[in-house]
């Protein structure tokens, strides 16, 4: 694999501006049968999303993926969303009981618009079989499958029927897969995204490693249709994680889905917990993301997200921050 780089190694090159205000730039994106305000989705993790946040996001036109860690609540969740005329977007695993869960959804006509198959090592037969099972029973549901980190995996999951694939093994902020196993796309997630997106014939979701709003634009430049983000969404007033106070400052917990805090045991642990500074309200972050993306579109010389896909870029190995902190 040549030309390995990550987000901090890349700068996008501006093109002549065609708008007179950034507010003219349109950040919306279509995934499946629905159009969303931003090409961004909060990670389907228990300290990032709950049903309240999911409802708020859906009500305001954002994409969301509910996590799978309270499996018994999922049917009621879908029904509640549909009662409010909102899209239902849930996650599943690949264990035996998930097969009967999908069967029940069909029999009870409780059919979510989106299902994400949420597995650490998505290039596997259990994921392929789950895609085929969902597509056989719920053909109208948009299936996102992952996570993967190679073009072969993208092609296999697409061929099995996935409508989108999710790329990112180990670049996450609370991920320790890279140190525990030596594997993954940590440190070269953006290059891995490019590699995978070139092979893809359907949308690719870049998952993990986003540390600044500019990384969203970079992901789009390198082939992502959508970006999944955990750490930047952690620590909000609404975030489900526990709030703690230290030296008069508020922090909120953010833990990995494969951490002992999620699993309740120290078995096959590939995630950790951290505390992030309290960031205020989620709405404000979403507005700032939208404004920053509108600005990125203006620098790309266009009026919508597609303009970013074609800009030139330079590789500036680890130097864009010049030793500065990100914020
Ligand atoms: N994006 C990323 O880099 C990563 C994300 N995660 C997140 O952690 C959560 C838990 O993931 P996961 O452990 O897959 O889910 P589960 O705990 O639901 O495991 C799913 C099934 O896959 C098996 N399995 C898990 N990992 C492997 C592997 N490397 N090789 C073969 N079989 C495997 C498990 O068996 P058994 O446990 O017996 O092996 C189990 O039967 C998910 O939310 C996932 O997204 C976790 C690690 C990396
Ligand atoms: N290796 C692990 N990866 C995990 C775990 N829990 C979640 N994740 C992945 O991280 C991203 C979020 O990344 P961030 O950089 O935006 O914070 C998330 O969507 C998952 O793909 C874990 O325990 N281990």
Image (cartoon, helix red, strand yellow):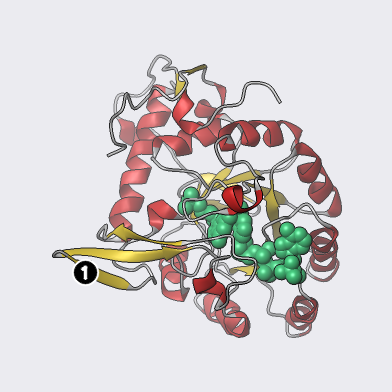
From the Cβ of disc 1, is ligand 2 less than 8 Å away? no
Residue at 83% across, 71% down: 137
Outermost residue, left side: 248
Picture layout, residue 133 above or below residue 183:
below
Q: Is residue 129 left or right of residue 11?
A: right
Q: How many marks do you count on the picture?
A: 1
* Image location (x, y in percent) of residue 82: 56, 76
Q: Secondary structure at mark 1?
A: strand
Q: Quadrant of residue 224?
A: top right
Q: Nearer the viewer, residue 226 or 85?
A: 226
Q: Is residue 258 in view? A: yes
* Image location (x, y in percent) of residue 319: 39, 22
Residue at 15% across, 64% down: 247
Q: Which residue is mark 1?
A: 245
Q: Nearer the viewer, residue 226 or 140?
A: 226
Q: Is residue 43 left or right of residue 326?
A: right
Q: Nearer the viewer, residue 104 or 99?
A: 99
Image quadrant holding the C terminus, namely: top left
Regarding ligand 1, which quadrant of the image does it lie in? bottom right
Image quadrant holding the N terminus, namely: top right
Q: Tell me if mark 1 has few (under 14), some (14-19) or many (20+) residues whose alpha carbon lies within 10 angstroms of its own.
A: few
Q: Is residue 4 left or right of residue 86?
A: right
Residue at 57% across, 42% down: 186
* Image location (x, y in percent) of residue 180: 61, 53
Picture layout, residue 89 above or below residue 72:
above
Q: Quadrant of residue 241?
A: bottom left
Q: Is residue 93 in view? A: no
Residue at 24% across, 60% down: 280
Q: Quadrant of residue 91?
A: bottom right
* Image location (x, y in percent) of residue 201: 76, 38
Picture layout, residue 163 above or below residue 269:
above
Picture layout, residue 203 above or below residue 86:
above
């Amino acid at each position: 694999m040549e030309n390995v780089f990550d987000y901090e190694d890349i700068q996008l090159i501006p093109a002549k501006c065609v708008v007179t205000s950034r507010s003219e730039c349109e950040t919306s994106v279509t995934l499946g049968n629905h159009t969303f305000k931003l090409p961004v989705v909060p990670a389907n993790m228990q300290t990032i999303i709950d049903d309240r946040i999911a409802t708020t996001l859906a009500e305001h036109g954002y994409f969301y993926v509910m996590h799978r860690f309270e499996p018994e609540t999922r049917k009621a969740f879908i029904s509640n969303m549909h009662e409010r005329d909102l899209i239902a977007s849930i996650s599943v695993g690949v264990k035996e009981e998930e097969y009967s869960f999908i069967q029940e959804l069909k029999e009870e006509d409780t059919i979510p618009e989106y299902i994400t198959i949420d597995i650490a090592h998505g290039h596997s037969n259990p994921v392929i079989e789950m895609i085929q099972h969902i597509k056989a029973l719920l053909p109208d549901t948009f299936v996102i499958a992952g996570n993967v980190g190679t073009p072969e995996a993208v092609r296999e999951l697409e061929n099995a029927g996935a409508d989108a694939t999710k790329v990112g093994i180990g670049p996450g902020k609370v991920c320790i897969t890279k140190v525990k196993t030596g594997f993954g796309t940590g440190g070269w997630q953006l290059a891995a995204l490019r590699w995978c997106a070139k092979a893809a014939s359907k949308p690719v979701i870049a998952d993990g490693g986003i540390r600044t709003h500019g990384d969203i634009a970079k992901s789009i430049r390198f082939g992502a249709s959508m970006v999944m983000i955990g750490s930047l969404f952690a620590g909000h007033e609404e975030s489900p994680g526990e709030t703690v106070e230290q030296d008069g400052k508020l922090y909120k917990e953010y833990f990995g889905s494969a951490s002992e805090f999620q699993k309740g045991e120290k078995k096959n642990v590939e995630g950790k917990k951290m505390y992030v500074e309290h960031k205020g309200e989620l709405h404000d972050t979403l507005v700032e993301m939208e404004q920053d993306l509108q600005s990125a579109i203006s620098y790309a010389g266009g009026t919508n997200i597609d303009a970013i896909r074609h800009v030139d870029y330079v590789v500036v190995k680890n130097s864009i921050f010049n030793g500065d902190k990100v914020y």
